[in-house]
């Protein structure tokens, strides 16, 4: 791959390449949290603990936000969320995320990060949201979806859609990893060479097996 030198950022000395490679997914969370305008004294719920949701939790924790509630069906993903800084994790089949938030706080201004990206999730976030809550749509739903506007109107909800990251946010993510602000090593669950890429994509379909698989060309 050839890139313009203006697009490159030097990896700090001593930072293992496998951790530097996690800069891009972390930057997605850095951008989403920045767009949320979340502040000290606010609380957060993260729906979906795949790479995007985990990145949001990591950045929320680095900003000192709490409590943070994470929700996912996968026990492995919930374990990773706790490792990255979630205060409480729930299986939404057993405990609605909003109920967990009410039990541990229930008073602070709430920001809900929708990081699942399938039809119906925005509506689900709206239905659980208390008055004046903010909803950040980070999950990339590629299908048509529907919502009931009165859910948002009656509670005066704010909904923000986000995508990607800015160059300065990418740099901030790399710096955070290099300076030890966040330990992403639990996130890296496998390594393959180029020939192993097809199987890696297949394996990533099992959330209990993998979160991120590193590709090492030439190994």
Image: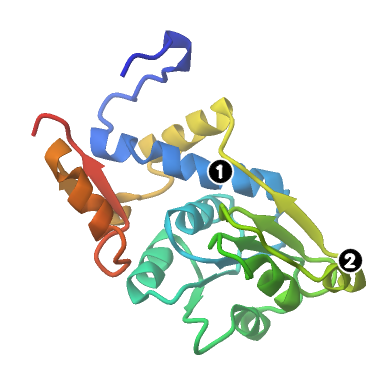
Placement of 147 over or under 17, stated as above or below: below
Determine the secondary structure under disc 1.
helix
Query: Which residue corresponds to mark 1?
Result: 30
Return the residue found at the far front: 144
Relative placement, left or right, of 117 versus 188 is right
Q: How many marks?
A: 2
Relative placement, left or right, of 193 versus 58 is left
Q: Which mark is residue 90?
A: none
- Look at 25% across and 38% down and name the residue there: 18
Return the residue found at the far top: 5
Across and down, in percent, residue 141 comes to 58, 56
- Look at 29% across and 66% down and name the residue there: 206
Q: Nearer the viewer, mark 2 or mark 1?
A: 2
Res. 20 image quadrant: top left
- Look at 37% across and 35% down and name the residue there: 178
- Look at 61% across and 59% down and name the residue there: 65
Along the line of sight, the residue nearer the viewer: 96 or 200: 200
Res. 50 image quadrant: bottom left
Across and down, in percent, residue 176 comes to 45, 39
**Colouring chosen for the image of the structure:** rainbow
Q: Nearer the N terminus, badge 2 or badge 1?
A: 1
Across and down, in percent, residue 145 comes to 67, 62
Q: Is residue 16 visible?
A: no
Across and down, in percent, residue 111 comes to 70, 62
Q: Quadrant of the C terminus?
A: top left
* Distance (Cα) linking label 2 and label 1: 26 Å
Along the line of sight, the residue nearer the viewer: 100 or 47: 47
Along the line of sight, the residue nearer the viewer: 162 or 179: 162
Q: Is residue 131 visible?
A: yes
Query: Which residue corresponds to mark 2?
Result: 156
């Amino acid at each position: 791959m050839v890139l313009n030198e203006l697009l490159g950022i030097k990896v700090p000395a001593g930072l293992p390449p496998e951790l530097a490679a996690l800069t891009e997914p972390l930057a997605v969370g850095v951008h989403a949290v920045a767009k949320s305008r979340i502040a000290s004294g606010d609380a957060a719920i993260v729906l979906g603990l795949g790479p995007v949701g985990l990145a949001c939790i990591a950045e929320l924790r680095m900003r000192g936000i709490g409590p943070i509630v994470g929700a996912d069906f996968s026990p492995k993903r919930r374990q990773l969320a706790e490792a990255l800084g979630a205060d409480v994790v729930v299986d939404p089949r057993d405990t609605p995320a909003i109920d967990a938030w009410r039990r541990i706080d229930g008073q602070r201004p709430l920001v809900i990060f929708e990081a699942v990206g399938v039809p119906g999730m925005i509506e689900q976030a709206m239905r659980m949201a208390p008055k004046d809550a903010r909803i950040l749509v980070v999950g990339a739903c590629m299908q048509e979806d529907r919502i009931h506007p009165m859910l948002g109107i009656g509670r005066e909800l704010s909904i923000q859609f986000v995508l990607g990251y800015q160059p300065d946010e990418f740099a901030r993510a790399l710096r955070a990893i290099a300076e030890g602000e966040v330990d992403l090593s639990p996130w890296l669950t496998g390594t393959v060479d180029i020939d192993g890429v097809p199987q890696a994509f297949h394996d990533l379909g099992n959330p209990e097996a993998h979160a991120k698989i590193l590709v090492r060309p030439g190994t």
